[in-house]
Amino acid sequence: MKRFFSVFLSAVMLCIVFAGCSSTQTPSAESTATSIEIEDSKAVDTTLPQEDIMYIIVGEHTLTVKLADNSSAAALQELLKKGDITVDAHDYGNFEKVGSLGTQLPTNDERITTEPGDVILYQGDQITVYYDTNSWSFTRLGKIQGVSADELKAILGDGDVTMVLSLTNNKSSEAYGRTKNSY
């Protein structure tokens, strides 16, 4: 019995020692920095910098496009700094609207399977807005934000559509509605 009591007392003491070693500690500076970085990156993701945004105005709707990080999107952005561009777009294959930009941009073609909302440069001089999928070698210009495939299809409608590409979200601006012929 004495031996059992000794073993029991030893086990209790070991539990107390191990419990003391595993007490909660304050986070290290490294884990705190990681938490702050994660919180900061969330703020960055939800607040898109103006230089990464383009707008496509279709009738009464303004679509926000997060531009891609490539020379093609940068060239389009530089072109839009000179003024809005109006594109007469035509339906193609019941999955996209495509129209001429009236100028050639650099290409960064890669094999892409598009998704609804993708904004693509085709053959260097045409802009395409996808409301369904397609696979081909394209240059990604950007992605429309916050609109479902059904909403996008409804906004773009059936047949031809006029799209105004702009760096400003101001539908009532003087530039709204200008045609490419007025440049």
Image: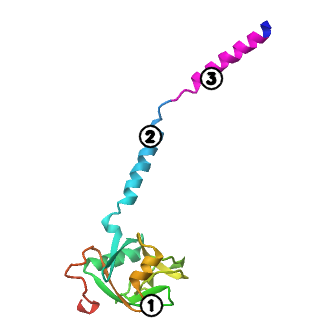
User: In this view of the protein, which residue sits in the foreground, 100 or 90?
Assistant: 90
Q: Quadrant of the N terminus?
A: top right
Q: CA distance from mark 3 to mark 1?
A: 71 Å
Image marks 3 and 1: residues in contact by CB distance under 8 Å: no
Q: Which residue is mark 2?
A: 32
Label 1 Cα crowd, 10 Å radius (few <14 / some 14-19 / many 20+) = some
Magenta stretch: includes residue 122 = no
Q: CA distance from mark 2 to mark 3?
A: 26 Å
Q: Secondary structure at mark 1?
A: strand
Quarter assignment of residue 101: bottom left
Q: Which residue is mark 3?
A: 18
Residue 141 place in picture, x, y as percent: 42, 76
Q: Main secondary structure of the magenta part?
A: helix
What amino acid is labelled 1 in the image?
Answer: Asp
Quarter assignment of residue 175: bottom left
Residue 16 place in picture, x, y as percent: 62, 19
